[in-house]
Amino acid sequence: MVSIFAQRVLPLAVLAVATVSVPFMMLSPTGLPRLRNLEEERRRADEEISRLGSQINALRAQVTRIKSDPAAVERAARDELGLVRTTEVVFQFSE
């Protein structure tokens, strides 16, 4: 009796449960919709990684220029720090 149950009924019961549960699991909020959301999140993360990689390369190039070019150091000091030479006169105009 046990062997007939194990050989015939149990596989059919497993198949029936799988036939019902697999589509239910795929269409549930934790199934295919979540998979699509995760794929979109990964695409956005890959774009962000690419953008940040480009930004890092640009900053490395800027560091190299500042280390090797005195004019680049002066431009950075003027633009970012607002420094002027001692021989220069600064005029400020009100708007």
Image (cartoon, grey):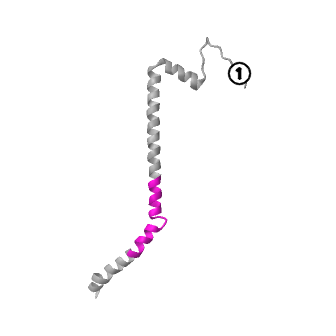
| The magenta stretch spans residue 25 | yes
* Badge 1: residue crowd in 10 Å (few <14, some 14–19, many ≥20): few
**Image position, residue 86 (x, y; %):** 61, 13
- Examine the structure image and report whether residue 8 is included in the region drawn in magenta: no
Residue that mark 1 sits on: 93
Q: Residue at x 55, y 22 (%)?
A: 77
Point 47% across, 62% down: residue:
33
Going 46% across and 40% down the picture, which residue do you hit?
A: 51
The x, y position of residue 59, in whole percent, is 47, 31
Q: Is residue 46 above or below residue 78?
A: below
Residue 26 placement: quadrant: bottom left
> Seen from this angle, which residue lies furthest bottom?
1
- Asked if residue 1 lies left or right of residue 90, the reply is left
Q: Secondary structure at mark 1?
A: loop
Quadrant (top left, top right, bottom left, bottom right) of the C terminus: top right
* Residue 78: x %, y % from top left: 57, 21
Q: Is residue 7 left or right of residue 62?
A: left
Magenta-tinted stretch: 19-40
